[in-house]
Image (cartoon, grey):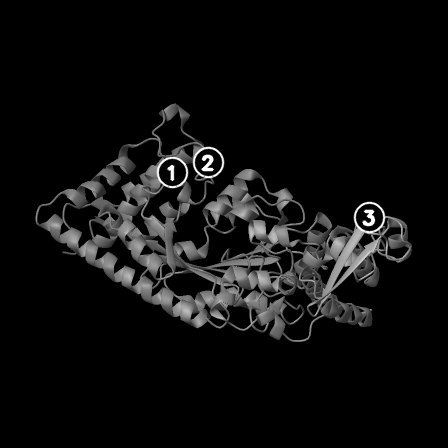
Amino acid sequence: MAFNFQSLQKQLPAWFRQGGAEGDVVLGTMGRLVRNLPGHAFPGWSTAEGRKAVADILLPAILEQPGFKNAWHAEMTELDYGFRRALLERRQISPCMAARQGGCHLLMNRKQDTVVMINEEEHLAIHSFAPGFDFDTLLQQLYRLPMGLSQALDFAQDAHTGYLTSLPAEAGEGVQLYTVLHLPGMTISNMVPQINRGIEKLQLHIAPFYPHLGEECGCTYILYTTPAPLGALEDTVAHLTTITGTLIERENQVRARLQEMTLRGDVFAIDRLNRSYGLMQYARAITAAEWADAISMLRLGVAAGYITSPDATSDELLAELAGLAIQGGDFATTAPTTERRHPREATAAELARCTAVRHFINHTTLHTAPATA
Amino acid sequence: MKKCQICGKRASIYLTQIINGQATDLALCETCAREKGLFDPQSLTFAEKFFPEVFRKSVDKIVKELIGQAEEAPAATPKSRCADLLTCCPTCGYKLENFRSCGRLGCSDCYNVFASEIRAEAGAEESGEPLPAEEAAPVSPALQRSRLEQKLQAAIEREDYETAATLRDELKKLN
């Protein structure tokens, strides 16, 4: 079935809406799995005929797998630039795939939790997403398709190296894992650069979830491993779980400290929250950068009990708002989104955000002290 | 002025060959040198040392003939993209210089063709780790041939012609 952008816009990915264990700090987990076919040039080196030959092998095999029989499917030439950008913002496709053309295919299951790219950097690349902090679910999702395909297809592998990839350093299990972290406490306390230095020594990396908004925008990050070497998948999962756990603990400590400061009369943290709420309440055009920052602060306010909702849970309202941030496809615009522009230049997405915000504001109350305290 | 050791005319070519520390001098005129095959690039005696470029081209040609890759073959297949089959993947035509410049490989068979380069990149040579590609399970004839070609090239470069001859025979057997 062909992709329908309108339908995808209306239907938010389930993994984005649902919470999970540690759902306030860990928004979700992501995995990337790659495989290649033996005897075929990798996509970066192959010809149009070579890519077509690979697609002719992989595509029918994938469409026979459970969960993909009625999957959305398109050749990259059929997808316009705006749609590619939207998928890129959701991290459902890689930047390399966003630039691909003929012979390269994209498939997405109806739950939108698994995206398959044919002839990306590798012959087969799968991105999978799971809500909350649950690597077991993620890995089950991630391996379901390649396990099914391995009944019919051979993947290029070596007994000593593992699954072979176009970049030798990435050969091995062919799997890379990510956690999506929401760290407003550490961000407003300027602790992220310090955390970053420490994490690099542990062979992990942390990067903004929306890199195109700049380092200072938003409080959402991805923490990720390098591709797991052969036989090291369990160790990689354990390592990432441990470090994520440490970051959750640290973030919660910082948040508790900020709350203590607020209760003692320090207006630093509450000022950021109130400003964000005020922006949401009164702005008539919100840029992507402002949006990302304000959503983070509102999430923090909801988690700390400063924002409550009588008729719906604030988490649900927030999920809708956050979902809007990844629907428009305007986060990746080349225009500097961090700059305040004249309201007359506001894009449709910026105006749409304000309409959605009104719904959030109308259904919530901002307190001067935590409602749960 | 030396005279040609065959016809007595004025010598224009002087050759010295040292085998096991024993030097042999030879002075020849151009005519006699041609008659004795010193200008024949396939001669593996003096010419290989004194006309290395001619000799190398000759070896390349022999290798190509051995594996049915004559230069006049059509230029559309990946194999024919390999101007130098000794540093080029026979499956996809990816060259060693491509790997050196971008760090990526052309296909899964490149892992065997450029095994030593990949190990060098990973720093495995310094740590003395086992060579995965060489220990790997049975490989296809194309890859085996490619490895032999690499070894043959290395043997030629270090002027180890006995090994080169053995490798050439092995290549012949593969065909």
Question: Would you say residue A312 is visible in this rendering?
Answer: no
The x and y percentages for residue A140 are 49, 69
The residue where tag 3 is placed is B12
Residue A257: name its quadrant.
Answer: bottom left
The residue drawn where x is 36% and y is 45% is A321
Q: Secondary structure at mark 2?
A: loop
Which amino acid does the dot numbered 3 rest on?
A: Ser
The residue drawn where x is 69% and y is 64% is B155
Q: In the visual, does B104 lie left or right of A214? A: right
Q: In the visual, does B108 lie left or right of A238? A: right
Same subunit, labels 3 and 1: the answer reads: no
The residue where tag 2 is placed is A333
Subunit that carries the residue with mark 1: A
Residues packed near mark 2 inside 10 Å, few (<14), some (14 to 19) or many (20 plus): few
Question: Would you say residue A215 is visible in this rendering?
Answer: yes
Which amino acid does the dot numbered 2 rest on?
A: Thr
Which amino acid does the dot numbered 1 rest on?
A: Ala
Q: Which mark is residue A140?
A: none
Q: Marks 3 and 1, how far apart in space?
A: 82 Å
The x and y percentages for residue A161 are 55, 69
The residue where tag 1 is placed is A288
Q: Viewer-proximal residue, A334 or A305?
A: A334
Question: Answer yes or no: do the residues labelled 2 and 1 have beta carbons within 8 Å?
Answer: yes
Q: Marks 3 and 2, how far apart in space?
A: 74 Å
Give the vertical position of B163 relative to A305 (above or below).
below
Q: Nearer the viewer, mark 2 or mark 1?
A: 2
Residues packed near mark 3 inside 10 Å, few (<14), some (14 to 19) or many (20 plus): some
Subunit that carries the residue with mark 3: B
Subunit that carries the residue with mark 2: A
Q: Nearer the viewer, mark 3 or mark 2?
A: 3
Residues packed near mark 1 inside 10 Å, few (<14), some (14 to 19) or many (20 plus): many
